[in-house]
Every structure is written in C-alpha cells, then in structure tokens.
Image (cartoon, rainbow, N blue to C red):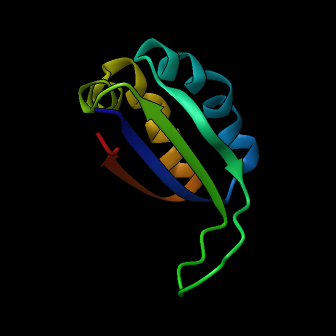
Amino acid sequence: MKAYLVLDLTIHDFAGFRPYIAAIPAFIKKHSGRYIVQGVQPTIMEGDWRPERMVVIEFPARENAEAFLSDPDCQDLFSIRHRTTTSRLVLVDGCS
C-alpha cells in the first residue's frame, strides 16, 4: 500500500534552506519516493488550517517512507529544515 509524507512548512531563512532543497530530492529517490506536490502555495478551501507551502511525497510503501525519515545520511538535511523553517510533517497510508 502506498504511503504519503505531507509537509506543511513556512520558510524563515530561504538562503539557509537552499542546501536542503538541492540535496533532498536524491534521498527521496533513493527510497523510491516521488514528489506529488512540491513546495506550492495551497488555496484554502475550508477550515482554519493555514499552511504557507505544501509538499506531498509518495512512497510505494510505509516502510520506504520510514526508511527515508530514519536514513542517517538525511539527518543533517532534516536539521537544516528544522532550523530554517517551521514545519509540520505527517505520514499517511494510501487506500488499497
């Protein structure tokens, strides 16, 4: 069953965030992921959720997403994201 990482982020330091933007696609690909939505500004249709930018990454299975998140080679990049943005990240399973 496919799994999706959904990221809601606000970038506070774009120059500091650039190394993450440049390097993270290779790690997503390494874990068989692909962008469905890549850093777009959403249109609010309902409710009080106000994300500034959205990213959705599809993985063939939850295990791939979890391997991506725990990949030791990605941890420095995740630290860059944490330092330069305010982000919320959820992992959800797709429909079978």
Q: Residue at x 53, y 45 (%)?
A: 56
Q: Position of residue 66 (x, y in %)?
A: 27, 32
Relative to 93, is 48 on the left or the right? right
Residue sitting nearer the eye, 7 or 47? 47
Q: Quadrant of the N terminus?
A: top left
Report which quarter residue 18 is drawn in: top right
Q: Position of residue 61 (x, y in %)?
A: 30, 28
Q: Is residue 64 above or below residue 42?
A: above
How many callouts does the rendering have? 0
Relative to 69, is 19 on the left or the right? right
Q: Residue at x 56, y 26 (%)?
A: 24
Residue sitting nearer the eye, 73 or 3? 3
Q: Quadrant of the C terminus?
A: top left
Report which quarter residue 43 is drawn in: bottom right
Q: Position of residue 15 (x, y in %)?
A: 76, 42
Q: Residue at x 59, y 23 (%)?
A: 25
Q: Is residue 60 above or below residue 85?
A: above
Outermost top residue? 30
Q: Position of residue 80 (x, y in %)?
A: 53, 40
Outermost left residue? 63
Relative to 89, is 49 on the left or the right? right
